Amino acid sequence: MNEAKSYTLGTLADLLEVRLEGDGDCRIDGLATLSQGHPGKLSFLSNPAYVHQLADCRASAVILEEKFAAACPVNKLISAAPYLTFARATRLFDNTSVSSWGIHSSAVVHPTAELGEGVSIGPNAVIEAGVRLGVNCSVGAGSFVGENCRLGDNCRLHSNVTLYHGVTFGANVIIHSGAVIGADGFGFAFDGEKSVKIHQLGSVHIGDDVEVGAGSTIDRGAIEDTIIEQGVKIDNQVQIGHNCRIGAHTVICGCTAIAGSAVIGRYCVLGGASGVVGHISIGDRVRVGAMSLVSQSISEAGDYASGTGIDSTARWRRNIVRFSQLDELARRLRKLESKAQSPGETGRKQSEE
Amino acid sequence: MNEAKSYTLGTLADLLEVRLEGDGDCRIDGLATLSQGHPGKLSFLSNPAYVHQLADCRASAVILEEKFAAACPVNKLISAAPYLTFARATRLFDNTSVSSWGIHSSAVVHPTAELGEGVSIGPNAVIEAGVRLGVNCSVGAGSFVGENCRLGDNCRLHSNVTLYHGVTFGANVIIHSGAVIGADGFGFAFDGEKSVKIHQLGSVHIGDDVEVGAGSTIDRGAIEDTIIEQGVKIDNQVQIGHNCRIGAHTVICGCTAIAGSAVIGRYCVLGGASGVVGHISIGDRVRVGAMSLVSQSISEAGDYASGTGIDSTARWRRNIVRFSQLDELARRLRKLESKAQSPGETGRKQSEE
Amino acid sequence: MNEAKSYTLGTLADLLEVRLEGDGDCRIDGLATLSQGHPGKLSFLSNPAYVHQLADCRASAVILEEKFAAACPVNKLISAAPYLTFARATRLFDNTSVSSWGIHSSAVVHPTAELGEGVSIGPNAVIEAGVRLGVNCSVGAGSFVGENCRLGDNCRLHSNVTLYHGVTFGANVIIHSGAVIGADGFGFAFDGEKSVKIHQLGSVHIGDDVEVGAGSTIDRGAIEDTIIEQGVKIDNQVQIGHNCRIGAHTVICGCTAIAGSAVIGRYCVLGGASGVVGHISIGDRVRVGAMSLVSQSISEAGDYASGTGIDSTARWRRNIVRFSQLDELARRLRKLESKAQSPGETGRKQSEE
């Protein structure tokens, strides 16, 4: 959309800190998958399952491991971690213009707000009293930053983001459109007739290098803050309840729901549309499958899942009927086993369970 | 709320292209369900289960099939497809005023944007550089249209919609409030310590006649575009990951989560809160049940489901305990069967499995 | 963030209508959990599981039941319902400043809108024609209130909320950021080739004292209104389809999906990420577990659930294979039982089922 970026392969090898095998003057103006590469493009081989595509590769160059170099008919960038090298290359070819509105004339910025050098505030954004934005922060069009929020350097709020009052960020935090940080946690006390609101007096703290996807919501704590530690990556439409703590570098895939006061470890991966019930703990390096519900604490690292496999609805219907009888089926099995253990007594003790 | 629309029954029969049995001068000023109809209203019978309600119908007229006409005591509009005729009638009675702000004085429109004839831009909307809007496009209040987006004719963005840069639409696309199109796909490469962002260089293309519900999110592709083909209908709070392709006329019910790089066929129906894992393919005319997870590719048309039925929590708890023992139960059953096959050997070979 | 509120313990006892045991002049400037309390803070004991924490309590005072008073070494506020008293105390210590912009100069308010006394309209909010806002209503920055919406007294829309046309509220309704009320219900009639839109002619009515969480969506009815009765509490990212009726004082936890035309009783609790299919009824005081799908009507009060427990992925994989064979396993069990009943006939009748 904007002017494409372009590099020689030699320059790319230097910037990506990998070894070039081939023509350093070859011009590269973009990235492509292995199967859709064509001249001028740089492709990559990360998953060995696609190694057979190398033979027909039409890209000008491929990022790959040394061991696959011989199978590659075009220029090569040799990397011990091709996917990581590819990630770094995407940054070089990203031609998104970062809007620099300065402080747009239609933005409403409270006079007590402190804006670091290089801050950009988009059209119709609102910055309330007592806000502090670090250097080079960018607030997208229509975004709202509530009273006394404090953002570190280089944070980016895309358009139509909402931060309630008192939210604090480290540096390099990215929040995508429609996300809401710091809304009231869902807390009520029942008085026998109706729900009485528990005012949520804590806030939300988000550490360095966190990214939050579009439409995600992170609630403020009831008394203390909800905490998202550094390096956590949160996909779209994720819900994080009040008082949660999400450990550093954990990855949370789209549509996951985490109930209040859950504590999640470091380097976890929560699969898409998974769930975590409230007031439980999950240790470090726990991986949860898609649409699985973590209904109790997990201390041991490893892979976990719940649910059933997909099946034709006709077969599935028969099986869920049996699921509803499962305890009874197990008891009947137990009874048969007892009989089989004492073959001389078949037909007796039928009421033992 | 606005002035009600009103037609004679004869005019309605002409507009809806159905046959009238009854009084063509009868005045109709709105629609009603069969059970709640009253004079002046037009009702419809689509599901034969409600045929018994005809006798007590107080509406002025009913849309129904020929075969039910005799049971209907009021005026009739005879249709081979009553639900479809009803759908067309809703259009005639829709009295929502389409706001025509022209270009509202508070909107921020970049001078390089190209606006087709009849375009309406609501208050505080933002249109960035290089945007092209087809004729009669309407952008709601507070919506943001990023750099170089291209929308076909008659597209409608409701209020507070966000389009990131470079998103392209066909004609007649409707996007409801809070939806976010073109946010970054969720892609990271792990370097052993932290997640390194894969910049998302593709965009999103949405075909003709697509509708996207409130709060839904469709991410931009990593390298190529995420594609939504023509006629796809997407309900609220649906998440579609990067690089997906959704086939024409597929219907996606609310809160469904589709992970990245999934390819879904034409004329599929994904039930509410269902899920699709990444990198799989679903063929044409596949129907997925509510809250079911499609965990592997499906090539054959038909109905599919996963999960278990709802039950009292007490019974359910007993059954999920048995589910966790299911493989063991099956092995014990197998053992009993082996014994039963060789009745003379009961009590032996107990350790065979 | 703002100036902390502070009370003497004697004043608090009066305001909370509970009995003080201890020093009425003791100054309290905030709330704390039992384990994190320190001088100046008021804590509470609601769950008897934490009674052992009393001994080490460093808070200045604790709200608790009479029966635990002896175990409490600090000042006491004696309450028959400590959690409820705590909820009331949070209100006293809430120091969030309610922005009072008056009618902000950047807001776009249609001249036909009727604004009650004390109404506050934030920056860049849009109020369309025919809107009526009751006394002391507050509309947050960037929020949109569509044509002819009617809000009772003391309603609060946080920032970036969207109300489509014709939505009506009782009094004291709170809507959090990103929520969308009154978008089109998801209704289409299939004409054999494509989906034909059913225009949604109803609206949404929300009763007194309802709270709706961030990013939640409630669709307008097809013909009649979608109804949320008084006192309902809705968490974040909840989806409520068209034509639903949610009974008074029901609590709906985050990420729950309720399909169209579902009718839910009073005083129900829908757990997080649960689902309700369309066109069914749920009676009063039904409680649904997290991530459970209500796939059929429930008339009897009580607790319900679906799904399976979390397990290691390795074990889970073996068990879901068996789940897919469950009907067959049950038939094989039945066959074995038949044999066991007639031990002399082992080996015969194998094809009976």
Image (cartoon, coloured by chain):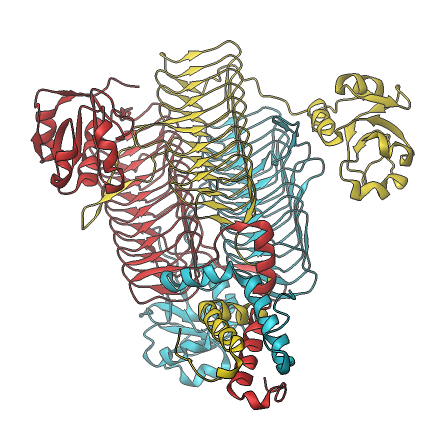
Chain colours: A yellow, B cyan, C red
* In-front residue for pair B279/C124: B279
Residue drawn at the location 61% of the way across and 45% of the way down: B259
Residue C9 in the image: above or below residue A196: above
Report if residue B210 is visible in the image: no
In the rendering, at what x and y percent does residue A41 appear?
A: 81, 30
- Residue A220 falls in which quadrant of the image? top left
Residue drawn at the location 67% of the way across and 59% of the way down: B298
In the rendering, at what x and y percent does residue A175 appear?
A: 51, 28
In the rendering, at what x and y percent does residue B141 appear?
A: 45, 35
In the rendering, at what x and y percent does residue A234 appear?
A: 53, 34
* In-front residue for pair C56/B93: C56
The quadrant of the picture occupied by the C terminus of chain B is bottom right
Say left or right for A154 vs C253.
right
* In-front residue for pair C272/C166: C272
Residue C341 in the image: above or below residue C132: below
Report if residue C210 is visible in the image: yes
* In-front residue for pair C336/B211: C336
Instruction: Please tell me how many numbered marks the rendered image carries.
Output: 0
Residue A248 in the image: above or below residue A33: above
Residue drawn at the location 28% of the way across and 56% of the way down: C247
Say left or right for C298 vs B15.
left
- Residue A95 falls in which quadrant of the image? top right
Residue furthest toward the bottom? C344
Residue B103 in the image: above or below residue C41: below
